Amino acid sequence: MQDIGDIFYNRVLLVALVACFVSQGLKLIFEFIKHRKLDLRVLVTTGGMPSAHSALVTALAAGVGQTIGWSSPDFALAAVVAIIVMYDATGVRQAAGKQARILNQMVDELFHEKPEFFQDRLKELLGHTPLQVVAGSVLGAAISCLASYWLTKAPS
């Protein structure tokens, strides 16, 4: 029986989480450059450049491929999950965000004299643009490759 503390020795998981956190940190930097103000909310919201979800799942899939093998069923599973997550980020969640924007605009225009409708606005930034997903994926793959290189070259 394994100890739950062994999870901290799972290099593939740790590298994937590092990729996610680096991506979130980059979002903060990009938002600061774009808006000239520090908005810490970007660290816990969806959307933005680069996609942290894409960085996470790409680093995970790459780590599984590097560790277990590119022809393993484990890599196939991780790759398929990564594709689904990235497709969802650009497709379904992006479309839901556009619908939320239209619905909020309709409420603004049709019910401007009834302020109770303004209290519960729909969240508009749900998904990612394809560029944000690609940037997150490239970041995740790069972090996984760098970690693999560093771990094989580091003295034991």
Image: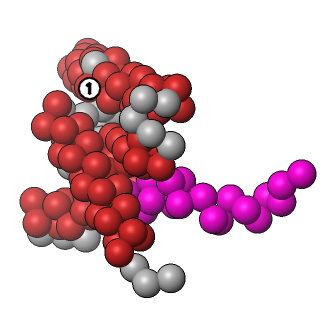
Q: Can residue 92 be seen in this view?
A: yes
Seen at 26% across and 26% down, the residue is 90
**Residue bounds of the magenta highlight:** 1-19
Quarter of the image for residue 58 reads top left
Q: State the image coordinates of residue 146 (x, y, percent, origin top left).
A: 29, 64
Figure disc tally: 1
Quadrant in the picture for residue 27:
bottom left
Most extreme residue toward the right is: 1
Percent of width and height locating residue 50: 23, 49
Which residue corresponds to the image point at 53% horizontal and 32% vertical from the top-left? 74
Say above or below: 92 vs 144. Answer: above
Q: Name the residue rendered at 83%, 55% in the picture.
A: 2
Q: In this view, does 76 lie to the left or right of 51?
A: right
Magenta span includes 6: yes
Q: Is residue 97 within the magenta segment? A: no
Nearest the camera: 130 or 73? 73
Q: Main secondary structure of the magenta part?
A: helix
In the rendered image, the vertical position of residue 135 relative to residue 32, given as above or below: above
Q: Residue at x 40, y 79 (%)?
A: 154
Pick the front one: 50 or 155: 155
Residue picked out by circle 1:
90
- Residue 25, above or below 144: below
Depth check: 34 or 106 in front?
Answer: 34
Residue 23 shows up from this direction: no
The answer to which quarter of the image holds residue 113 is top left
- What kind of residue is marked 1? Thr
x, y (%) of residue 97?
30, 26
Q: What element carries label 1?
A: helix
